[in-house]
Image (cartoon, rainbow, N blue to C red):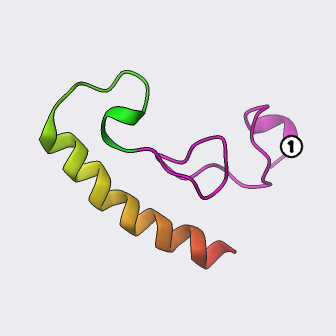
């Protein structure tokens, strides 16, 4: 994929993983990302998803 296809703030030559911030390998979950509602269940779900995504990120590096 051409570099122009990635968001201009993105530093890597790959698509950002879900919940990955503009800093590669840093993930936001729960109330930290834009538009989040203050609810515990989504935060817990996203938190557990970040564990899996962090392992995916480490496999890429």
Magenta span: predominant SS is loop
| Mark 1 crowdedness (10 Å alpha carbons): few <14, some 14-19, many ≥20 | few
Residue 1 at x, y percent in the picture? 80, 49
Q: Is residue 5 above or below residue 58?
A: above
The quadrant of the rendering that contains the C terminus is bottom right
Q: Check residue 14 for magenta coloring.
A: yes
| Point 54% across, 48% down: residue | 20
Q: Residue furthest bottom?
A: 59
Residue 28 at x, y percent in the picture? 45, 44
Residue 25 at x, y percent in the picture? 60, 59
**Numbered label tally:** 1
Q: Is residue 21 left or right of residue 7?
A: left
Q: Which residues are magenta?
A: 1-28
Residue 30 at x, y percent in the picture? 30, 40
| Point 59% across, 75% down: residue | 58
Which of 44/4 is in front?
A: 44
Q: What is the quadrant of residue 14 in the picture?
A: bottom right
Q: Check residue 8 for magenta coloring.
A: yes
| Point 31% across, 26% down: residue | 36
Q: Is residue 21 above or below residue 14?
A: above
Q: What is the quadrant of residue 52 in the picture?
A: bottom left
Q: Secondary structure at mark 1?
A: helix
Q: Residue furthest top?
A: 35
| Point 32% across, 33% down: residue | 31
Q: Is residue 26 left or right of residue 41?
A: right
Q: Residue furthest right?
A: 3
Location of mark 1 (residue): 3
Q: Is residue 22 left or right of residue 4?
A: left
């Amino acid at each position: 994929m051409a570099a122009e296809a990635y968001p201009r703030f993105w530093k890597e030559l790959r698509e950002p993983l879900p919940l990955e911030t503009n800093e590669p390998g840093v993930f936001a979950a729960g109330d930290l990302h834009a538009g989040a509602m203050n609810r515990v269940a989504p935060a817990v779900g996203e938190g557990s998803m970040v564990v899996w995504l962090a392992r995916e990120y480490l496999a890429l590096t």
